[in-house]
Amino acid sequence: MKKGNLKYKFISCGSVAIFLFVWYLITDGLHLFPSNTFPSPIKVFYAFINKLTVKNPDGGTIFTHLIASLSVVLYGYGLGIVIGIPLGLFMGWYRKADLIVKPLFDLIRPIPPVGWIPIMILWLGIGITAKSAVIFISAVTPCIINSYTGVKQTSKVHVWVAQTFGASNWYTFMKVGIPSALPMVFTGLKVSLGASWMALVAAEMLASTKGLGYMIQMNRMVGKADNIIVGMIVIAIVGAVLTYILERLEKQFVKGRHM
């Protein structure tokens, strides 16, 4: 590891340590807030350990809820990627595809993902299919927008050079357009991931029987703030891990990208 990278790692760890110290200071240290509404990091830590094996009051351990949420997120997110990225690339490269799809997409895009929850529950019930459909809508929109923008920013000079050497439009799209769009594509993947988690938690709070959102909602109803924060922290950690994986993939696939 380079010396500069090590320095930034220490700075990042230091900022987390300061945050935890301030949190402890205003709770257990100075008692500025009631422990039942704003628990200290120590109490949250013990709640996390307890939640690894105890199912009450929400009917599941932290792993039960995490696996339920991950299965829904990855299903809807994966479908959003598979459809959104190719669709955005084709819309950006082929004018006919843009003319056909963009008007409908522009009508649907302003609707917030949580706005789809009631109708999805009505159509599909409260099972995994409804939640995955909401997450799909959350994920597909950023994928389309960023893929579309990325391929639109392809250098005209690179396209001209490819055409000069006799490359077909399809070959130019595959060898010039898509590689040029990859940085924006990966940006869309990361934005979609965050949007998927937000939609999932909202969907699970409204209609679910398990999952991290359901866990947070059930503990809110019984006033267990420590378990609520545990659920939030687990979401944050899993989101950070998935984002890190995407960044590593970006480093591997996007040429000239140094992170």
Image: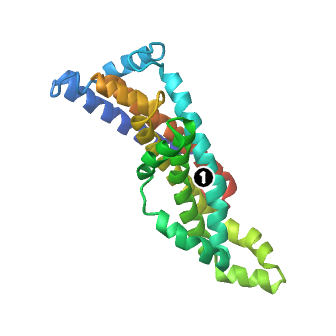
- State the image coordinates of residue 87 (x, y, percent, origin top left): 64, 64
Left or right of 50? Residue 173 is right
Residue 201 visible in the snapshot: yes
Left or right of 193? Residue 158 is right
Q: Give SS at disc 1.
A: helix
- State the image coordinates of residue 81 (x, y, percent, origin top left): 62, 53
Which of these two is toward me, 20 or 211? 211
Q: Residue at x 49, y 69 (%)?
A: 106
The colour scheme used to paint the residues is: rainbow
Q: Quadrant of residue 88?
A: bottom right
**10 Å crowding of disc 1: few (<14), some (14-19), many (20+):** many
Count numbered badges in the picture. Answer: 1
Residue type at mark 1: give it.
Gly
Q: Residue at x 43, y 39 (%)?
A: 201
Q: Quadrant of the N terminus?
A: top right
- State the image coordinates of residue 9 (x, y, percent, origin top left): 47, 41
Left or right of 46? Residue 68 is right
Which of these two is toward me, 230 or 23? 230
Q: Residue at x 46, y 48 (%)?
A: 119
Looking at the image, which residue sits at the far right?
166
Which of these two is toward me, 226 or 16? 226
Residue 181 visible in the snapshot: no
Q: Residue at x 68, y 76 (%)?
A: 94
Disc 1 target residue: 80
- State the image coordinates of residue 110 (x, y, percent, origin top left): 43, 63
